[in-house]
Amino acid sequence: MSAKKIAPQKLSASITSDEVLVREISRVVSEITGVQLGEKQSHMVASRFHKRMIDLKINSIAAYVNYFNENSDQEVQSLVSLLTTHHTYFFREFPHFEYLRTTGLKLLVDSAKARGQKKLRFWSAACSRGHEVYSLATFLETHLKQVDPQFDYEILGSDVDQESVAIAANGVYNRKEIASIPSLYMADYWVKGTGEISDFVKIKNSIKAKCQFKIENLVEFQPFTQTPFDSIFCRNVFIYFNQAQIAAITGKFMKSMHQSGLLFVGISESLHGSGLDIKNIGTSIYTHKTAATSAPAAVETVARGTAAPAATAAPVEKPKKLRVLCVDDSPTVHTLLKQILKPEFGFEIVGKALNGLEAAEFLKKQSVDLMTLDIHMPQQTGVEYLEKNFKRGHPPVVMISSVSRDNADLAMRALQLGASDYVEKPALNKLDEQAEQIRTKLLCAHLSQNANAGKVSQLDRQFQKSVDIKNASQCFRLVLASPGDRTKLEFLMRELTKEEPPTVLLMQGMEAMLPAVAKDLSSLTGRTIEVIENDINKLQTNHIYIADFDKHFAKLKTQFGKNRTSILVYGRFADATMKAVAQWTPAQVLVEDIGDKNEKLKIKATDLVPGTSFGYMSSEYLGSKNG
């Protein structure tokens, strides 16, 4: 594998303005890659380029121009890597994989058999760092033998960026990167790293051997007419090219495929009006106009999990909507799931529950195809629900929880009890960023129909861990609450059973009532709660205290401001109080989700979560730096 020799490039020494330099850099990269870097992309180019100058420790335009001209070949390659987009993830746009499973693989296998072949060839053009290649590989490992046990496959991955190709060929990724992979395609295909790379995973050698990588410029490549492909994936790339380039590249793709071959482009992209002899057989799926297919060209099948295309004269075949019960005590999560699981994506939310007890009652009256389930909920948690209710015939369950998937006590327990898959919630105001992962994992759970229920993968077992605050004396926890939060505080205190930092409950305007509140909470929880009068110098680990906010907040900040701190805020507080909390930095600030858009409180909250999640999230944060 070797990079194509790039023609020598030079920048004019007369460049003196930042704007002109950014424009010239955009021109150089565009000429080499074909990627359009115009006015709309100028902010992105400027932002990434300025970071490049910082990394090079260059602080003037003249100095950079001189550096560029002295290191042209190397710097051009660095700019190509910097300015070509690498945003991708495993099993992106899953409806294309679903099309292959239901229709495409059989078409390709039947055509290959007719040619006397027993191997399918795929090309992932613009493969970036390999996520699409290994998604295809693990998908084929799972489903190809089901179509024909004698068939095998090979995949070529290519990209214009040399660095991305090297990463893809290495096949090593951070554990968090594979979180989007459905359990159906993860269990047996990855191995855990050891030693310094213990937080990483690597694709198994048996799969990697079927994947080859090369540097390829889509603007300049020559058609693979001697070794044509059965299918080409070139998704979410054409948005960076002009229409003439798209038509030219597509034309070469079609020459590089068998007559029955399938070309997949990004779901937001279309080749309509390209003037080529192609036909559309699915959502952003194309083949040669003369190819025999199982569906007429006039009919576009709407892949489940993606929005239907704009209305056309052609009839549209829509799959049955999957009926979903959503179980979570967060009003915000229910609102977001309603947006994520819209009917146009192939789902219908037919019920919602705030805890396991409500979910069980709902299922006595109505059947569903799928269930989403939180872990931390009042009255009955997600784990308790599974312990009591999961059995043969139960609809597949996908956990959507703030608990880390690696948590041995909760997440692993949920999977052992029958949950099909797991999605870690990000901050709630970013949950929509994981919309596709949620839809994909629900679809795969429906596909597997609990076939692997209760079977935790070896990889999950290797990564599992317990939340442990090892240096509790160097940490601190503050809880802002009122007497009305009595039940929520009980839930929190019952969770704080391991090595804990000093924890202080702060209440506002209730100094005279604090002894009575402390006695009540102590009676309720069995935990001793001490009232802070004046001395805050002797607060101890594994102790819970209660104090007046106005009298002690500033003192506590002075005393413990350097400690790793987690602040939990129940309910509503005055703006002045929230402003004071915001000044305690750095700190984790968890604000209770009470369903009234309280994320707009005048505070930069780390996350907006149900109060039932406070204990776990606080302990995980306090333990993460010391773990």
Image (cartoon, grey):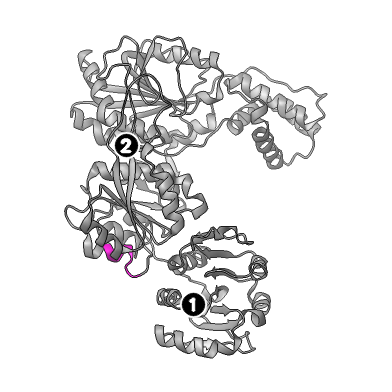
> In this image, 160 relative to 535: left or right?
left
From which residue to which does the magenta span run?
379-385
50 or 241, which is in the foreground? 241
Relative image position of residue 281 (x, y in whole percent): 33, 20
Residue 184 shows in the view: no
Amino acid residing under circle 1: Gly
Residue at 55% x, 79% y: name it.
Answer: 504
> In this image, 442 relative to 488: left or right?
left
Label 1 to label 2: alpha-carbon separation: 52 Å
Q: Which mark is residue 484?
A: 1
Label 1: few (<14), some or many (≥20) within 10 Å?
Answer: few
Q: Examine the image and state in which quarter residue 359 appears.
A: bottom left
Residue at 68% x, 31% y: name it.
Answer: 42
Residue 516 shows in the view: yes
Amino acid residing under circle 2: Thr
Is 214 magenta? The answer is no
536 or 50, which is in the foreground? 536
> In this image, 422 relative to 242: left or right?
left
Q: Is residue 540 above or below residue 31?
A: below
Residue at 43% x, 10% y: name it.
Answer: 276
Residue at 53% x, 33% y: name it.
Answer: 163
